[in-house]
Image (spheres, rainbow, N blue to C red):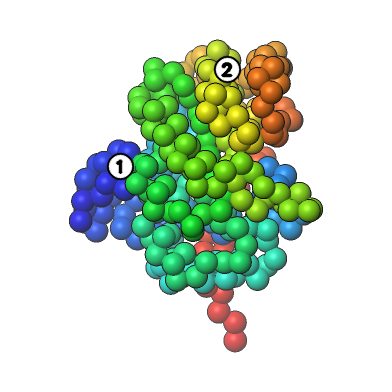
Amino acid sequence: MECNGCPRHCKVDRAKHRGYCGASEDITLARVSVHMGEEPPISGTAGSGTIFFSGCNLKCVFCQNSDVSRNVVGETISVDRLVEIFHELEEKGVHNINLVTPSHYVSKIRDALKIYKPSIPIVYNTSGYDSLEAIDSLAGLVDIYLTDLKYCDSTLSNKYSSAGDYFDVATAAIKAMYRQVGPLVLDSTGIAKRGLIIRHLILPGCTDDSKRVLDWIARNTPDATVSLMSQYTPMYRAKEFPEINRTITKLEYKVVLNYLNKLGLDGYMQDMSSVGESTIPDFNLEGVKKCITK
């Protein structure tokens, strides 16, 4: 069957060949764990039950998880095993089930959630490069959309992520996400139960583009929660692009943060101490295989 599940529409038969995303027909996972490194209402005090999917439909030259996204390091599992993982994470007492980079496995994820929908929220943690059909198909299954809005300028998105249509695709998807779940809703302890969080990673030398991204949010989803990220660390192929082969400056961060405040947007601002590789998980297949006890 030809794959048209994401905006690439690569039409590859993933039963025989890997798609543009690097994935086969089977779900491939790199790690399943309790994660404390997400936004405060996602990680909370008990952690987020993260499921890291291998492969990616973007080609970001600065990717911090290139072993997983590009080399598709991981273990293949069945839909039934994914359902078991939902149960296992839920039993650990996490606040939510966090599907990280899920876009190229939407049909299998949807099958799993139709078999078993956990009693805790499902987080769809995505680059934003999602088709409308995929997002519409998740209505009633996903509770929280945690999405990137990486770029406004098509020149930047084409150069750094091989996706000249990124902004048009991502903004259409975000509007659909917002129609489904609305603004962020927290429980009495400050834990997210439902809604939309839009992440934006500030890139070196790109403060004007960051402002344009925030302008779009302010015009189209003004009560959405924004997560402004300062953690950019040049990795993978960033050294081939001298203009982004550095971390952002304090001034760049201040310029974008001040603009966000000027627009009246609300959310979470990442401290600049987050720069570096310490936040990158070890993709060692933890939690992927079923633990059999005697």
Residue at 41% across, 60% down: 110
Residue at 55% across, 13% down: 208
What is the C-alpha distance between the residues marked 1 and 2?
A: 31 Å
Residue 90, image x, y percentages: 63, 67
User: Tag 1's secondary structure?
Assistant: loop
Question: Could you classify mark 2 by the number of other residues whose Cα lies within 10 Å: few (under 14), some (14-19), or many (20 or more)?
Answer: many
Can the viewer see residue 288 in this picture? yes
Which residue, given by chain and number where applicable, does mark 2 sit on? 211
Can the viewer see residue 203 in this picture? no
Question: Could you classify mark 1 by the number of other residues whose Cα lies within 10 Å: few (under 14), some (14-19), or many (20 or more)?
Answer: many
Instruction: Name the amino acid, label 2.
Output: Lys
Quadrant that contains the N terminus: bottom left
Residue at 59% across, 70% down: 88
Mark before the other along the chain sequence, 1 or 2: 1
User: Tag 2's secondary structure?
Assistant: helix
Q: Is residue 232 above or below residue 206?
A: below
Which residue, given by chain and number where applicable, does mark 1 sit on? 20
Q: Is residue 149 above or below residue 281?
A: above
Quadrant that contains the C terminus: bottom right
Q: Quadrant of residue 48?
A: bottom right
Residue 85, image x, y percentages: 53, 67
Q: Nearer the viewer, residue 90 or 286?
A: 90
| Labels 1, 2: front one | 2
Q: Quadrant of residue 280?
A: top right
Q: Quadrant of residue 245?
A: top right
Residue 250, image x, y percentages: 71, 17
Instruction: Say left or right for 239 vs 38.
Output: left
Residue at 74% across, 58% down: 46
